[in-house]
Amino acid sequence: MAMSVGNSADDGAMCEINTTPLIDVMLVLLIMFIITIPVMTHAVKLDMPRPTNAPPPPVQPEVITIEIDFDGTILWNGTAVSGVDALEKYFRVESQKDPQPELHMRPDKRAKYDVVARVLAAAQRNRMKKIGFVNVAEFAD
């Protein structure tokens, strides 16, 4: 907005048009145009097949607990395993199942890292995919 300040000697009529009401009217017209336009809806009709029977419930995988004691003893669901070689035989059998069982590792907090790493490496070599550590809250000391 500009304002013209003239001399007191210039008493002529002002020839500039006031555009503020024109802009207001244009904004009102624009808003009315936007409101009155019908909303364009793009819909694609699809004929989806109807299920004749419900799908079978998901099968829960078997859970295998592997415990590693402080002295390096490996327990497979509570049964002692003679070593990593025997453990690999168990892994080979279990990796062929469908669905593949979940391995829940539960190492003692005093267990050597070497034993835990060898068990994890054996599981990985035999393509076990679902491996997790359980009850690791006791390591927070």
Image: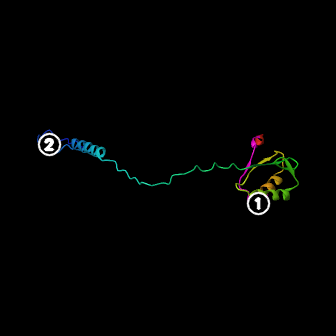
Q: Position of residue 53 (x, y in %)?
A: 57, 50
Can residue 81 be seen by looking at this rendering? yes
Q: Position of residue 38 (x, y in %)?
A: 31, 47
Q: Position of residue 135 (x, y in %)?
A: 76, 42
- Residue 43 numbered mark, or none: none
How far, Cα to Cα, is label 2 from label 1?
Answer: 94 Å
Amino acid type of the residue tagged 2 in the rendering: Met
| Location of residue 45 with respect to 14 vertically, above or below | below
For marks 2 and 1, give the one nearer the viewer. Answer: 1
Amino acid type of the residue tagged 1 in the rendering: Asn
Q: Single out the residue that lies furthest toward the front.
A: 52
Of residue 124 and residue 114, the one placed in the foreground of this image is 124
Q: Single out the residue that lies furthest toward the bottom.
A: 125
Counting every numbered tag in the picture gives 2
Element type where label 2 sits in the image: loop
Can residue 1 be seen by looking at this rendering? no
Instruction: Please give the residue where the numbered disc 1 appears in the rendered image.
Output: 126
Q: Quadrant of the C terminus?
A: top right
Residue occupying image coordinates x 27% and y 43%: 32
Q: Are marks 2 and 1 in contact (CB under 8 Å)?
A: no
- 87 in the magenta segment: no
Q: Position of residue 18 (x, y in %)?
A: 19, 43
- 129 in the magenta segment: yes
Start-end of magenta stretch = 121-137
Instruction: Please give the residue where the numbered disc 2 appears in the rendered image.
Output: 14
Q: Quadrant of the N terminus?
A: top left
Of residue 113 and residue 94, the one placed in the foreground of this image is 94
**Earlier-in-chain disc, 2 versus 1:** 2
Of residue 89 and residue 18, the one placed in the foreground of this image is 89
Q: Single out the residue that lies furthest toward the left.
A: 12
Residue occupying image coordinates x 81% and y 56%: 90
